[in-house]
Amino acid sequence: MRAAAAAPESGPAAPGGHGNVAAGLRGVTMRYPSQAEPALRHVTLEVAEGEFVCLLGPSGSGKTTALRLIAGHEQPQSGTVVLGGCSANGVPAHRRNVGMVYQSHALFPHLTVAHNVAFGLRMRGVARAAQYERVAWALDLVRLGQAGERYPDELSGGQQQRVALARALAIEPSVLLLDEPFANLDRHLRDDMRLELKALQRRLGITTIFVTHDQEEALALADRIAILSGGRLEQTGPPELVYHRPQNAFVARFLGEMNLLPAALGQPVPGSGEDLRLALVARVPLAVRPPSGARRGDIVAVCLRGEHLRLAPLSEVSLGAGEGGARHWSGTIELATYRGAATHYAVTLEGGHTVRVVEPAAAPARWRVGDRVAVVWIAGVAHSVWPNGDTPRDVIVAGRQRSTAGEAGAGGAA
Amino acid sequence: MIAGQEAPVQRPAASPLARPLRLALPPLRPPVGGTATWALLAPALALTVMLLIVPTLWLVRLSLLESGAGDAARFYVPSSFTLAQYRQVLTDPYFGAVVWSTVRLALVTGAVCLAVAYPLAVWITRARRPVGGVALWLVSLPKLTNALVVLYGVLLLLGNAGLLNRALLALGVIRTPLPLFANLFAVVTGEVLLVVPYPVMMVAGALWAGGRELREMEEAARGLGASPLRAFLETTFRLTLPGAALALLVTLVWAAGAFAAPLVLGNPALYTAAVEIHTQTFERLNWPLAAALAIVHLAIVAALAAAALTLHGRRATRRRTSPPALSGLSQVQRAKPALSTAEGCNGRPELVEGMQSAHNWGVRDGSTIGTSSGTRTPLSRERNGVRAAAAEAVDRRVWDRTLLRMSVAARGWSFRDRMTGWFGRSMFHAFALLTLAVLLCPLVFSLLVSLTPEETIGLPAPERGLSLRWYVALGRDPLWLRAFAHSLLTAAVATGLAVPAGALAAAGIDRLPDGARRGVTLLLIAPLFVPGAVLGLQALALSYRLGLWGTPYSTGLAHAMWTAPLAFLVVRAALRVTDRRLEEVARGLGAPPVAAFCLITLPRLWPALAAAAFLCAVMSLNELPMALFLATASNRTLPTLIWPQLRYNLTPIVAAASSVLLLLTIAGLLVAAVLAGRLVRRSERPAGAPDTRGDATGIPSAGVLYAHG
Ligand SMILES: Nc1ncnc2c1ncn2[C@@H]1O[C@H](COP(=O)(O)OP(=O)(O)O)[C@@H](O)[C@H]1O
Ligand SMILES: [Mg+2]
């Protein structure tokens, strides 16, 4: 836990040091003719050769649109779609050599599995023998070697999705696009398919953009995560970085069980490498990493992850512990939700804020609604973001707001 | 291995069209209360049985009687029996020619219709929102207005002194008039204009039903390297072929029943069975021969329908349409031992590792295709560096083989692509707009002609201005006024009977068990598939026996039977988009079934009922063959009065009368459209529910698909 809160090692949000931009968008704005609002606003997302990027966002945030732009099924109003380092604007979809896997798998129902996989090769005029070998290779890749003669509707959902993957891989695409490919599968199958996909991607070294609204999926798979909301790119970076150092309130709230509490920045904390500030968070002083450009006296939203809070009996925590001791608040349990691996509590602090606490199943005590408890901050430095990122009201009424945001996050994860 | 564990998911549908127009909401099946259900269905069934089935049987009997022709007072000799009529129909070369011209007209019309309708439907479904909808309305207009208006317009255009010839002569393109009239070309043109709305609706319905699924498939094909046209042909086109076959069925059935077009635009050599039935009935007064002809005519239609249905069935079930190139693949694959060693490995921790080595195995197999490698070791848990390297080598080798080609393909897009794309799109738009123009041309011409100030037929000359004199003449002529009154009375009778019967049947039909539902549905919509001339002869025979002959009620009753299927289809479509779970909610809150229906479902059905009423009225107002068979001096409707004038005595008053019908129809349709629009807006369609515009416009495309699909 402590380690997790420490600064993640990785640095830049730009594509990793692999070199060339294999695929991406540069300053792309795209509006559907029938829509008043653009589906994407000024999005810049560059994916390096061999990189696995997850595009994560609530539904309707423009993820599919981004993929369709790269695949060439839509054209941007402004900005550039990049493929292989060059602009691909205006290049028709069938000349792009981009592999796409749809949530609905979009297999051709009138063709056998083998012919589905061979379709792209046939379109390229690949010789029969080479088609043959290639199809066998691709089907083996997804371990459906024996299913060549069957029709898509004779396969299970997971198998269909794997055929779709084989079909996309058979053309050796310069970039593989996956649009929520596993959303229709049940949970265990989805977990298996994820691992399989990741292993395949590693092995083939294929540049991949994976769209999902499921944050667990994104965190598990990605080399880099890009978070979209309302057509805007909110943040990109490695999963740990995005998870632990969100750049704004939206990202902070979107991933995991996050509590945002308002606090004014105080004096610098001496002796640390970073620029840390002391802030009174609901009357408890914490070392806070301020957002860039913040000065003393600014109000920021301090990010307290549910997993970094623990509950303890009030009697056990010595009030006003010394410098090294744990920080804590006292409060009342409002709600307890059993989740198997953990129990989620909503606790109303004395100041009136409500925070969500995630207690692992191994925690010594179980609490009931109405219990008076101490909420202990077990991590070191707390991250913070500007409260008025896009919705200033967030933090103003943080007490109420927190619980609903927590709920939304939980819903997304489930 | 891991995935070998997954439970077989329930079979997804083979093609989006294997289940055309199925709605997302399951039809509500209240417990089947036998008598209540049959009571709901009774009126519509009674109409069909009394006015279709019984007369058909009587027609069979009639065809076996001896002819009373020659003896002016008698149409047949009662209580006799002979097969002479059939013998004559089947052996006489004259009737052979009639049968042949009927079949030929149907086939040619069917082929032309499909060739025109399919691309037009594609264009409509891909046009922007309002454009596609408006285009669909425009397409349906000729069918819903009077057939005579359309034929009249074609006559004006194609006749020897027709506008087309005159224009071409004036422009100096031709020296002598082209033979555009009184030949097969003219008849097919007229018949295509009359029939083509149906296949357009049906194909558009199929495309809409395929919706997002089809679009994604086509996109996937493009992403795999197919050019736009190729992608369309490989996916959407193939998958909508069953729908197109159904459209062909409807086209054939209607074209085989052609009556007015051959008479107005053709010559005696082109007269069809329907024309011959009319001649035998009224000119030769040989009812038994007419009845035998009607039975043969029904048989022709049934044969054509069966042929189209077979085509549809083959299309829907035959899936091995893939090119044979790869068909040996799976045999080779099967020769390999199954990759089942790790089948049971569903444990979590070793998953990744197991998977990776499994992959390696798979790849090794890929490299040795055709030779069965029997040396399969159980899943090894250790990493095997050699094996991994080999796998990588295979990856590279297989990839390299086509790499060159692919990258060329990727760079090969060019100016040519753009030009072919641009050219293709332009041609497509031009085709669609031209077709729409041709479809509407006859209507516009007859409207314009009705405004001429001259004594003779022709477009109003700009310098003489427009005049309403022919409308005034129409309004002063008691003959026309009486016909107008008869038309309204007939329409009122038809609507008053058809809508309640159809609506009740629609409410009852979903309560039947599957088999019975299919059968009853077919029976209820059967009148739509019986040629007009056959229906007319039956109606004549029936009303003669019932003593209704010569009253407007005889036509009204026949029209009620004929339009009831329409009301049935429209209301059923509305019931299916109306969320009947709301009724369940009401019942859960304590409302008894009838109250729940009346309080919740009925209010939401009013627009559909009104739309059905308007459509039935419009159809009845414009119906010709039945009205013609039943017409006497005391019950002529407007179309039957226009009819002889059209054939023998063309004055602009006919254009005025046609235009009155046209405007009445448009007004009725607009009201129906507004009401249907309100219905659709009110019942929020669940995502993915197909468009019901086809039903809202009264063209029973959806119904036909339901019935056969
Ligand atoms: N074909 C379309 N026509 C019009 N608007 C669309 C279309 N596809 C998506 N949109 C709109 O664009 C926005 C982004 O959609 P999408 O990219 O599908 O989101 P996501 O995949 O993240 O759920 C949404 O507001 C959606 O309503
Ligand atoms: Mg999406």
Image: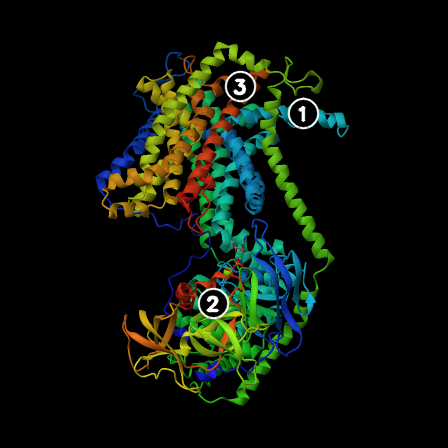
Label 3 or label 1, whichever comes before in sequence order: 1
Q: Amino acid at mark 3?
A: Ala
**In screen coordinates, is A308 left or right of A224?**
left
* Residue found 28% across the figure and 44% down from its top: B512
Q: Residue at x 56, y 37 (%)?
A: B108
Asked whether residue B578 is in view, the answer is: yes
Disc 3 with disc 1 on a shared chain: yes
Badge 1 density bin: few <14, some 14–19, many ≥20, Cα 10 Å: some
Q: Between label 1 and label 2, give the one nearer the viewer.
A: 2
Dot 2 crowding, Cα within 10 Å, few <14, some 14–19, many 20+: many
On screen, residue A16 above or below B204 = below
Q: Which amino acid type corresponds to the residue marked 2 in the rendered image?
A: Phe
Q: Nearer the viewer, residue B381 or B288?
A: B381
Give a yes or no on whether discs 1 and 2 share a subunit. Answer: no
- Can you give x and y, in whole percent of width and height, for residue B43 in the image? 29, 31
Q: Is residue B67 visible?
A: no
- The residue indicated by pointer 3 is B657
For the image shown, how many numbered marks are present on the structure? 3
Frontmost residue, A114 versus A34: A34
User: At label 1, which amino acid type do we have?
Assistant: Leu
How far apart, in angstroms, are the residues tagged by discs 1 and 2? 70 Å
Residue labelled with disc 1: B163
Label 2 to label 3: alpha-carbon separation: 69 Å
Neighbor class of circle 3 (other Cα within 10 Å; few <14, some 14-19, many 20+) is many
Locate residue A255, reporting x and y percent. 47, 70
Residue at the spot x=45%, y=70% of the render? A261
Tell me whether the residue at label 3 lies in contact with that at label 1, contact meaning CB atoms closer than 8 angstroms: no
Q: In the image, what residue occupies the spot 46% across and 86% down?
A: B375
* Residue under label 2: A254
Label 1: which secondary element: helix
